[in-house]
Protein backbone atom coordinates (compact mmCIF):
# COMPACT_ATOMS: atom_id res chain seq x y z
CA UNK A 1 0.00 0.00 0.00
CA UNK A 2 1.49 3.36 -0.98
CA UNK A 3 1.69 6.37 1.35
CA UNK A 4 -1.29 8.22 -0.14
CA UNK A 5 -3.54 5.17 -0.07
CA UNK A 6 -2.52 4.53 3.53
CA UNK A 7 -3.44 8.10 4.49
CA UNK A 8 -6.88 7.83 2.89
CA UNK A 9 -7.57 4.45 4.48
CA UNK A 10 -6.34 5.58 7.90
CA UNK A 11 -8.78 8.48 7.75
CA UNK A 12 -11.66 6.15 7.04
CA UNK A 13 -12.27 7.69 3.64
CA UNK A 14 -12.06 4.48 1.65
CA UNK A 15 -15.72 3.66 1.96
CA UNK A 16 -17.23 0.22 2.05
CA UNK A 17 -20.58 1.55 0.78
CA UNK A 18 -20.74 2.86 -2.78
CA UNK A 19 -23.43 5.31 -3.72
CA UNK A 20 -25.69 4.26 -6.58
CA UNK A 21 -25.18 7.63 -8.27
CA UNK A 22 -22.06 6.30 -9.99
CA UNK A 23 -24.22 3.80 -11.84
CA UNK A 24 -26.33 6.65 -13.24
CA UNK A 25 -23.41 8.33 -14.99
CA UNK A 26 -23.19 8.05 -18.78
CA UNK A 27 -20.94 5.19 -19.84
CA UNK A 28 -20.00 6.46 -23.29
CA UNK A 29 -19.24 10.09 -22.47
CA UNK A 30 -15.90 11.46 -23.70
CA UNK A 31 -14.00 14.68 -23.15
CA UNK A 32 -13.74 16.33 -26.55
CA UNK A 33 -12.26 19.74 -25.82
CA UNK A 34 -10.49 21.51 -22.98
CA UNK A 35 -10.17 25.29 -22.76
CA UNK A 36 -7.94 26.88 -20.15
CA UNK A 37 -8.31 30.57 -19.30
CA UNK A 38 -7.63 33.17 -16.64
CA UNK A 39 -10.70 34.76 -15.07
CA UNK A 40 -9.90 38.38 -14.11
CA UNK A 41 -11.56 39.71 -10.96
CA UNK A 42 -11.74 43.08 -9.23
CA UNK A 43 -11.75 43.65 -5.47
CA UNK A 44 -14.30 46.05 -3.99
CA UNK A 45 -11.45 48.09 -2.49
CA UNK A 46 -7.68 48.32 -2.47
CA UNK A 47 -6.22 45.86 0.06
CA UNK A 48 -3.12 47.11 1.83
CA UNK A 49 -0.31 45.40 3.70
CA UNK A 50 -0.34 42.59 6.23
CA UNK A 51 2.37 41.70 8.75
CA UNK A 52 4.56 40.12 6.06
CA UNK A 53 3.60 41.36 2.62
CA UNK A 54 3.29 44.74 0.95
CA UNK A 55 0.07 46.02 -0.61
CA UNK A 56 -2.21 43.32 -2.03
CA UNK A 57 -4.00 45.61 -4.48
CA UNK A 58 -7.45 45.42 -6.02
CA UNK A 59 -7.02 42.76 -8.72
CA UNK A 60 -6.82 38.96 -8.77
CA UNK A 61 -7.53 36.11 -11.13
CA UNK A 62 -8.60 32.48 -11.09
CA UNK A 63 -7.02 29.87 -13.34
CA UNK A 64 -10.02 28.17 -14.91
CA UNK A 65 -10.86 25.21 -17.16
CA UNK A 66 -13.84 24.34 -19.34
CA UNK A 67 -14.30 20.62 -20.08
CA UNK A 68 -16.46 19.92 -23.13
CA UNK A 69 -18.00 16.49 -23.73
CA UNK A 70 -19.80 14.64 -26.50
CA UNK A 71 -22.87 14.52 -24.21
CA UNK A 72 -23.39 18.27 -24.54
CA UNK A 73 -22.61 18.99 -20.88
CA UNK A 74 -19.67 21.10 -19.82
CA UNK A 75 -17.60 21.11 -16.64
CA UNK A 76 -16.40 24.49 -15.39
CA UNK A 77 -14.09 25.22 -12.54
CA UNK A 78 -10.91 26.44 -10.94
CA UNK A 79 -7.99 24.23 -11.98
CA UNK A 80 -4.26 24.85 -11.71
CA UNK A 81 -3.21 21.65 -13.50
CA UNK A 82 -0.96 22.29 -16.47
CA UNK A 83 -1.79 21.76 -20.12
CA UNK A 84 0.05 18.45 -20.30
CA UNK A 85 -1.94 16.97 -17.41
CA UNK A 86 -5.24 18.22 -18.78
CA UNK A 87 -4.50 16.76 -22.20
CA UNK A 88 -4.64 13.30 -20.62
CA UNK A 89 -8.41 13.76 -20.25
CA UNK A 90 -9.03 14.05 -23.99
CA UNK A 91 -11.10 11.19 -25.44
CA UNK A 92 -11.42 9.69 -21.94
CA UNK A 93 -14.58 9.19 -19.91
CA UNK A 94 -14.16 11.84 -17.20
CA UNK A 95 -16.21 9.77 -14.79
CA UNK A 96 -13.61 7.02 -14.79
CA UNK A 97 -11.93 9.22 -12.16
CA UNK A 98 -15.01 9.52 -9.95
CA UNK A 99 -14.99 7.53 -6.71
CA UNK A 100 -18.47 8.24 -5.40
CA UNK A 101 -18.17 6.13 -2.25
CA UNK A 102 -14.97 7.90 -1.30
CA UNK A 103 -16.24 11.38 -2.22
CA UNK A 104 -13.25 12.15 -4.41
CA UNK A 105 -11.89 12.40 -7.92
CA UNK A 106 -8.68 10.69 -8.93
CA UNK A 107 -6.74 11.29 -12.12
CA UNK A 108 -4.11 13.67 -13.48
CA UNK A 109 -5.48 17.00 -12.19
CA UNK A 110 -4.13 16.81 -8.65
CA UNK A 111 -6.10 19.22 -6.46
CA UNK A 112 -7.71 20.88 -9.49
CA UNK A 113 -10.75 18.61 -9.74
CA UNK A 114 -13.44 21.31 -9.63
CA UNK A 115 -14.32 20.97 -13.37
CA UNK A 116 -14.79 17.21 -12.91
CA UNK A 117 -17.05 17.74 -9.91
CA UNK A 118 -19.09 20.28 -11.87
CA UNK A 119 -19.44 17.80 -14.71
CA UNK A 120 -20.50 14.99 -12.38
CA UNK A 121 -23.10 17.20 -10.71
CA UNK A 122 -24.56 18.19 -14.05
CA UNK A 123 -24.64 14.61 -15.31
CA UNK A 124 -26.40 13.46 -12.13
CA UNK A 125 -28.56 16.59 -11.83
CA UNK A 126 -27.30 17.19 -8.31
CA UNK A 127 -25.42 20.05 -6.61
CA UNK A 128 -21.81 19.21 -5.83
CA UNK A 129 -22.34 19.56 -2.09
CA UNK A 130 -24.62 16.52 -2.22
CA UNK A 131 -21.95 14.51 -3.99
CA UNK A 132 -19.51 15.56 -1.26
CA UNK A 133 -21.78 14.40 1.56
CA UNK A 134 -24.56 16.97 2.02
CA UNK A 135 -24.38 16.86 5.82
CA UNK A 136 -23.78 20.57 6.50
CA UNK A 137 -26.22 23.40 7.30
CA UNK A 138 -28.55 24.88 4.71
CA UNK A 139 -26.78 28.24 4.92
CA UNK A 140 -23.01 28.39 5.35
CA UNK A 141 -21.39 30.80 7.85
CA UNK A 142 -19.01 33.25 6.14
CA UNK A 143 -16.66 36.08 7.04
CA UNK A 144 -15.14 39.12 5.37
CA UNK A 145 -11.39 38.55 5.21
CA UNK A 146 -10.46 41.90 3.68
CA UNK A 147 -9.61 44.18 6.63
CA UNK A 148 -5.93 44.87 5.94
CA UNK A 149 -3.64 47.75 7.00
CA UNK A 150 -5.68 50.59 5.50
CA UNK A 151 -4.04 52.97 7.99
CA UNK A 152 -0.70 52.51 6.21
CA UNK A 153 -2.08 53.47 2.80
CA UNK A 154 -1.15 57.08 1.97
CA UNK A 155 -4.64 57.94 0.75
CA UNK A 156 -6.04 57.23 4.23
CA UNK A 157 -3.12 58.41 6.38
CA UNK A 158 -5.00 61.44 7.69
CA UNK A 159 -8.31 59.66 8.30
CA UNK A 160 -7.47 56.01 8.84
CA UNK A 161 -9.85 55.53 11.77
CA UNK A 162 -12.78 56.60 9.61
CA UNK A 163 -11.54 54.34 6.82
CA UNK A 164 -11.83 51.24 9.01
CA UNK A 165 -15.38 52.23 9.89
CA UNK A 166 -16.14 52.59 6.18
CA UNK A 167 -14.70 49.16 5.43
CA UNK A 168 -16.79 47.53 8.17
CA UNK A 169 -19.85 49.30 6.77
CA UNK A 170 -18.99 47.95 3.32
CA UNK A 171 -18.86 44.43 4.71
CA UNK A 172 -22.10 44.84 6.65
CA UNK A 173 -23.80 46.07 3.49
CA UNK A 174 -22.61 42.94 1.66
CA UNK A 175 -24.33 40.84 4.34
CA UNK A 176 -21.36 40.02 6.56
CA UNK A 177 -21.50 39.84 10.32
CA UNK A 178 -18.02 38.39 10.87
CA UNK A 179 -14.70 40.05 10.02
CA UNK A 180 -11.07 39.00 10.05
CA UNK A 181 -8.78 41.89 10.94
CA UNK A 182 -5.10 41.87 10.04
CA UNK A 183 -2.70 42.77 12.84
CA UNK A 184 1.09 42.61 13.23
CA UNK A 185 2.19 46.07 12.14
CA UNK A 186 5.15 45.88 14.50
CA UNK A 187 6.57 42.88 12.68
CA UNK A 188 7.76 44.90 9.68
CA UNK A 189 6.11 48.26 9.09
CA UNK A 190 6.24 50.07 12.45
CA UNK A 191 8.36 49.97 15.61
CA UNK A 192 7.22 47.02 17.69
CA UNK A 193 5.59 48.88 20.57
CA UNK A 194 3.97 51.44 18.28
CA UNK A 195 2.73 48.74 15.90
CA UNK A 196 1.21 46.65 18.69
CA UNK A 197 -0.55 49.72 20.05
CA UNK A 198 -1.96 50.52 16.60
CA UNK A 199 -3.22 46.94 16.25
CA UNK A 200 -5.19 47.34 19.46
CA UNK A 201 -6.48 50.75 18.46
CA UNK A 202 -7.78 49.37 15.15
CA UNK A 203 -9.44 46.39 16.81
CA UNK A 204 -11.14 48.68 19.34
CA UNK A 205 -12.41 51.01 16.59
CA UNK A 206 -13.89 48.06 14.73
CA UNK A 207 -15.48 46.59 17.85
CA UNK A 208 -16.97 49.92 18.89
CA UNK A 209 -18.21 50.75 15.40
CA UNK A 210 -19.52 47.29 14.55
CA UNK A 211 -21.07 46.77 17.95
CA UNK A 212 -21.08 43.82 20.36
CA UNK A 213 -22.80 41.40 17.99
CA UNK A 214 -20.30 41.30 15.14
CA UNK A 215 -17.75 38.49 15.12
CA UNK A 216 -14.09 39.56 15.02
CA UNK A 217 -11.05 37.41 14.38
CA UNK A 218 -7.45 38.68 14.43
CA UNK A 219 -4.85 37.43 11.92
CA UNK A 220 -1.19 38.24 12.64
CA UNK A 221 0.42 36.34 9.74
CA UNK A 222 3.02 35.12 12.27
CA UNK A 223 3.81 38.71 13.23
CA UNK A 224 3.50 38.13 17.00
CA UNK A 225 5.06 35.71 19.45
CA UNK A 226 3.55 33.79 22.36
CA UNK A 227 4.25 36.38 25.04
CA UNK A 228 3.02 39.35 23.00
CA UNK A 229 -0.12 37.39 22.16
CA UNK A 230 -0.76 36.85 25.87
CA UNK A 231 -0.23 40.56 26.53
CA UNK A 232 -2.73 41.47 23.81
CA UNK A 233 -5.34 39.13 25.22
CA UNK A 234 -4.79 39.88 28.91
CA UNK A 235 -4.99 43.62 28.45
CA UNK A 236 -7.73 43.84 25.85
CA UNK A 237 -9.70 40.65 25.13
CA UNK A 238 -12.41 41.34 27.68
CA UNK A 239 -13.30 44.42 25.62
CA UNK A 240 -12.49 43.02 22.18
CA UNK A 241 -14.09 39.56 22.58
CA UNK A 242 -12.06 38.04 19.76
CA UNK A 243 -13.71 34.95 18.28
CA UNK A 244 -10.49 33.52 16.88
CA UNK A 245 -6.76 34.17 16.66
CA UNK A 246 -5.08 33.22 13.39
CA UNK A 247 -1.38 32.64 12.73
CA UNK A 248 -0.24 34.59 15.75
CA UNK A 249 3.22 33.01 15.54
CA UNK A 250 4.86 30.17 13.58
CA UNK A 251 3.13 26.85 14.21
CA UNK A 252 4.39 25.07 17.33
CA UNK A 253 2.41 22.44 19.24
CA UNK A 254 3.82 23.28 22.67
CA UNK A 255 3.33 27.04 22.27
CA UNK A 256 -0.22 26.63 21.05
CA UNK A 257 -1.07 24.34 23.96
CA UNK A 258 0.38 26.99 26.27
CA UNK A 259 -1.80 29.63 24.62
CA UNK A 260 -4.90 27.43 24.83
CA UNK A 261 -4.33 26.89 28.55
CA UNK A 262 -3.89 30.65 29.00
CA UNK A 263 -7.15 31.33 27.15
CA UNK A 264 -9.00 28.68 29.16
CA UNK A 265 -7.72 30.01 32.48
CA UNK A 266 -9.27 33.39 31.68
CA UNK A 267 -12.57 31.85 30.59
CA UNK A 268 -12.47 33.25 27.05
CA UNK A 269 -14.09 31.45 24.11
CA UNK A 270 -11.40 32.56 21.65
CA UNK A 271 -10.36 29.80 19.22
CA UNK A 272 -6.95 29.22 17.65
CA UNK A 273 -6.72 28.93 13.86
CA UNK A 274 -3.72 28.05 11.69
CA UNK A 275 -2.47 25.92 8.80
CA UNK A 276 -2.90 27.98 5.63
CA UNK A 277 0.75 27.70 4.59
CA UNK A 278 0.91 23.90 4.75
CA UNK A 279 0.98 21.79 1.59
CA UNK A 280 0.89 18.30 3.14
CA UNK A 281 -1.94 16.82 5.19
CA UNK A 282 0.51 15.03 7.42
CA UNK A 283 1.72 18.39 8.76
CA UNK A 284 -1.60 18.74 10.60
CA UNK A 285 -1.37 15.37 12.36
CA UNK A 286 0.58 16.41 15.51
CA UNK A 287 -1.60 19.52 16.00
CA UNK A 288 -4.77 17.45 15.65
CA UNK A 289 -3.51 14.70 17.94
CA UNK A 290 -2.68 17.25 20.65
CA UNK A 291 -5.74 19.42 19.96
CA UNK A 292 -3.32 22.33 19.79
CA UNK A 293 -5.34 24.16 17.10
CA UNK A 294 -9.13 24.53 17.03
CA UNK A 295 -9.61 25.55 13.38
CA UNK A 296 -7.52 24.11 10.54
CA UNK A 297 -7.09 26.29 7.47
CA UNK A 298 -5.72 24.28 4.58
CA UNK A 299 -5.78 26.39 1.42
CA UNK A 300 -8.88 25.65 -0.66
CA UNK A 301 -7.16 25.69 -4.03
CA UNK A 302 -3.92 24.06 -2.90
CA UNK A 303 -5.68 21.04 -1.36
CA UNK A 304 -8.84 20.95 -3.47
CA UNK A 305 -12.00 19.17 -2.40
CA UNK A 306 -10.28 15.87 -1.74
CA UNK A 307 -7.63 17.36 0.53
CA UNK A 308 -10.00 19.60 2.47
CA UNK A 309 -12.42 16.72 3.06
CA UNK A 310 -9.54 14.61 4.33
CA UNK A 311 -8.41 17.45 6.60
CA UNK A 312 -11.98 17.84 7.86
CA UNK A 313 -12.24 14.13 8.64
CA UNK A 314 -8.96 14.21 10.54
CA UNK A 315 -10.18 17.23 12.53
CA UNK A 316 -13.69 15.88 13.10
CA UNK A 317 -12.36 12.80 14.87
CA UNK A 318 -10.97 15.13 17.55
CA UNK A 319 -13.93 17.49 17.67
CA UNK A 320 -12.06 20.19 15.72
CA UNK A 321 -13.08 22.50 12.88
CA UNK A 322 -11.95 23.52 9.40
CA UNK A 323 -12.13 26.89 7.67
CA UNK A 324 -10.29 26.74 4.34
CA UNK A 325 -7.96 29.61 3.54
CA UNK A 326 -9.14 31.50 0.48
CA UNK A 327 -7.51 34.80 -0.45
CA UNK A 328 -7.20 36.04 -4.02
CA UNK A 329 -9.69 33.54 -5.42
CA UNK A 330 -13.22 34.51 -6.36
CA UNK A 331 -14.16 30.97 -7.40
CA UNK A 332 -12.54 29.54 -4.27
CA UNK A 333 -15.34 31.17 -2.27
CA UNK A 334 -17.93 29.01 -4.05
CA UNK A 335 -15.76 25.94 -3.54
CA UNK A 336 -15.69 26.58 0.21
CA UNK A 337 -19.45 26.99 0.33
CA UNK A 338 -20.03 23.54 -1.15
CA UNK A 339 -17.62 22.08 1.40
CA UNK A 340 -19.55 23.94 4.11
CA UNK A 341 -22.81 22.39 2.89
CA UNK A 342 -21.18 18.96 2.79
CA UNK A 343 -19.61 18.49 6.25
CA UNK A 344 -20.57 19.04 9.88
CA UNK A 345 -17.36 20.61 11.26
CA UNK A 346 -17.05 23.63 8.98
CA UNK A 347 -16.40 26.94 10.76
CA UNK A 348 -16.68 29.79 8.24
CA UNK A 349 -15.93 30.47 4.57
CA UNK A 350 -13.42 33.23 3.86
CA UNK A 351 -14.72 35.89 1.47
CA UNK A 352 -12.29 38.03 -0.47
CA UNK A 353 -14.70 40.61 -1.96
CA UNK A 354 -13.85 39.99 -5.60
CA UNK A 355 -16.27 40.19 -8.51
CA UNK A 356 -16.49 39.66 -12.25
CA UNK A 357 -19.22 40.12 -14.84
CA UNK A 358 -17.94 37.11 -16.81
CA UNK A 359 -19.02 34.48 -14.27
CA UNK A 360 -22.70 34.30 -13.32
CA UNK A 361 -23.38 32.86 -9.86
CA UNK A 362 -27.14 32.80 -9.35
CA UNK A 363 -28.41 31.53 -6.02
CA UNK A 364 -25.43 32.54 -3.87
CA UNK A 365 -26.48 35.29 -1.45
CA UNK A 366 -24.63 36.52 1.63
CA UNK A 367 -27.12 37.66 4.25
CA UNK A 368 -26.89 38.00 8.04
CA UNK A 369 -23.45 36.38 8.10
CA UNK A 370 -24.33 33.27 6.11
CA UNK A 371 -24.49 32.39 2.42
CA UNK A 372 -27.01 30.37 0.49
CA UNK A 373 -25.88 27.61 -1.86
CA UNK A 374 -28.08 26.85 -4.87
CA UNK A 375 -29.50 23.41 -5.57
CA UNK A 376 -28.56 23.78 -9.24
CA UNK A 377 -26.66 20.88 -10.82
CA UNK A 378 -22.91 21.08 -10.32
CA UNK A 379 -21.87 24.39 -8.82
CA UNK A 380 -24.60 26.41 -10.51
CA UNK A 381 -21.99 28.65 -12.14
CA UNK A 382 -22.07 29.71 -15.77
CA UNK A 383 -20.24 32.03 -18.11
CA UNK A 384 -21.66 35.05 -19.88
CA UNK A 385 -20.47 33.97 -23.31
CA UNK A 386 -20.38 37.45 -24.83
CA UNK A 387 -18.30 38.82 -21.98
CA UNK A 388 -16.15 35.71 -21.97
CA UNK A 389 -15.34 36.23 -25.65
CA UNK A 390 -14.45 39.89 -25.20
CA UNK A 391 -12.82 39.98 -21.79
CA UNK A 392 -10.99 36.71 -21.09
CA UNK A 393 -7.55 35.51 -22.09
CA UNK A 394 -7.61 31.91 -23.32
CA UNK A 395 -4.37 30.15 -22.34
CA UNK A 396 -4.92 27.03 -24.43
CA UNK A 397 -7.57 25.20 -26.43
CA UNK A 398 -7.11 21.43 -26.67
CA UNK A 399 -9.23 19.30 -28.99
CA UNK A 400 -9.52 15.58 -29.47
Image: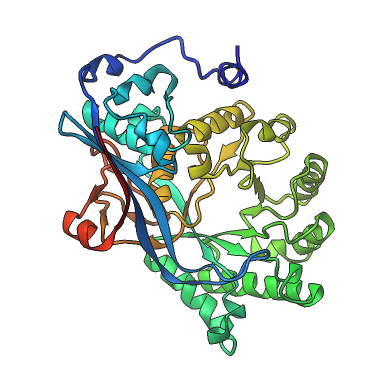
Give the image quarter of residue 84: top left
* Residue at the limit of the structure toward the top, as seen here: 16
Give the image quarter of residue 286: top right
Q: Quadrant of the C terminus?
A: top left
The figure's colour scheme reads rainbow
Q: Is residue 369 in sight in this rendering?
A: yes
Of residues 146 and 272, which is closer to you in this image? 146
Of residues 263 and 168, which is closer to you in this image? 168
Of residues 73 and 183, which is closer to you in this image? 73
Position of residue 315 measured from the top left corner of the image (x, y, whole percent): 60, 32
Residue appearing at x 56%, y 76% in the figure: 150
Q: Is residue 128 left or right of residue 226?
A: left
Question: Is 214 situated above or below 67?
Answer: below
Position of residue 323 measured from the top left corner of the image (x, y, whole percent): 54, 44
Q: Is residue 32 left or right of residue 278?
A: left
Question: Is 46 situated above or below 392?
Answer: below
Position of residue 371 measured from the top left corner of the image (x, y, whole percent): 37, 50
Residue appearing at x 29%, y 14% in the figure: 20
Q: Is residue 268 left or right of residue 344?
A: right
Q: Quadrant of the N terminus?
A: top right
Position of residue 29 measured from the top left corner of the image (x, y, whole percent): 21, 23
Amino acid sequence: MDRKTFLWSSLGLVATRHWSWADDLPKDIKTTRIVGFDLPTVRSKFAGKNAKRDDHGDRASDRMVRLYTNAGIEGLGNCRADEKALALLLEKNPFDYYRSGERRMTGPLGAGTMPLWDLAGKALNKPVYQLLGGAGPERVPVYDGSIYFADLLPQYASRWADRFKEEIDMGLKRGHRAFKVKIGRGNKWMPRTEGDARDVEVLKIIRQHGGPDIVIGADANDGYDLERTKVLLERHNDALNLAWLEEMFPEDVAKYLDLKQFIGTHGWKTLIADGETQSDLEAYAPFIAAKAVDIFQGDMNRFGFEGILAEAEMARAQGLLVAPHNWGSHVGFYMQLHVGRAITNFYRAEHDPLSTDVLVADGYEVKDGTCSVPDAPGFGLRLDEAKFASGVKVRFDLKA
